[in-house]
Amino acid sequence: MKQVFVVMAAVPLIGLLLLVGCGAPDGRPSTSQGHAGAEKHARAHEDTSKQEAPAVPEGGYTLSVAANSLGGGQVEVEITSNVPGTIEVMAGVAVAGQKPDDPYIGVSQKVIVRDGSGKVVLDTAELPSGEYEAEVDFYPRWGFKDQESRRTGIAERLHSSVSITLAGSGEAVRIVSTRMRQLPLGISVDCW
């Protein structure tokens, strides 16, 4: 039993001695590729690990949005972009001209944009009637979804919007906004 153990323990040692003694000047085993082959392998490995950022398009990276009322309280939001790869954006329809301290009246949803194109249908039936903005925003903090898009190096938010008129619920935006301002703090209305 001890003899088998000694032989088994000696096999890795013998293998190591054979590798060191194979004629490679630095102690690594030589291959049929030789030194030039090893350099070629190292360059190929560098090429895949250090891919360069894509060339920035003239005018920079952009988003654009188009909105179409489909009837029945549905709005189709189409997104196009020149950002390569896959990104995630926030697309929505919100009352035009809202200020930061106004009650938010609108709907929004995250949308995947692959190879420059994305689409979502938003339910706007419960929104009040009025003038709206269909908007799309890319936030680099969470919007990159693959290595190709990350390599762009985009560091700032991208934004696009277009105006759209909605018949909505028939109620005026002004009335809904006033009613929402009168709600006690901490109470929200889920449909807006």
Image (cartoon, rainbow, N blue to C red):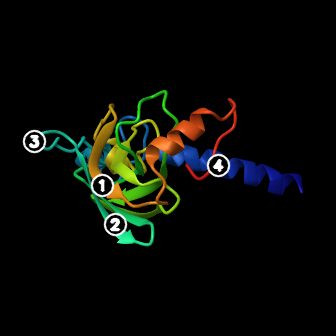
Q: In the rendered image, which residue does mark 3 sit on? A: 58
Q: Amino acid at mark 1?
A: Ile
Q: Are marks 3 and 2 in contact (CB under 8 Å)?
A: no
Q: Earlier in the sequence, mark 1 or mark 2?
A: 2
Q: Earlier in the sequence, mark 3 or mark 2?
A: 3
Q: Residue at image x 23%, y 45%?
A: 62
Q: Amino acid at mark 2?
A: Ser
Numbered circle sitting on residue 164: 1
Q: Amino acid at mark 3?
A: Glu
Q: Are marks 4 and 3 in contact (CB under 8 Å)?
A: no
Counting from the top left corner in percent of width and height, residue 10 is at 70, 48
Q: Earlier in the sequence, mark 1 or mark 4?
A: 4
Alpha-carbon span between mark 2 and mark 4: 73 Å
Q: Residue at image x 37%, y 43%?
A: 138
Alpha-carbon span between mark 3 and mark 2: 32 Å
Numbered circle sitting on residue 12: 4
Q: In the rendered image, which residue does mark 2 sit on? A: 69
Observer-side mark, 2 or 4, equals: 2
- The answer to whether residue 15 is visible is yes
Counting from the top left corner in percent of width and height, residue 40 is at 25, 48
Q: Are marks 1 and 2 in contact (CB under 8 Å)?
A: yes
- The answer to whether residue 21 is visible is no
Q: Amino acid at mark 4?
A: Pro
Counting from the top left corner in percent of width and height, residue 80 is at 26, 57
Alpha-carbon span between mark 1 and mark 3: 29 Å
Observer-side mark, 4 or 3, equals: 3
Task: Please state which of residues 26 and 139 is positioned toward the viewer in this rendering.
Answer: 139
Density class for disc 3 (Cα within 10 Å; few <14, some 14-19, many ≥20) is few
- The secondary element bearing badge 1 is classed as strand
Density class for disc 4 (Cα within 10 Å; few <14, some 14-19, many ≥20) is few
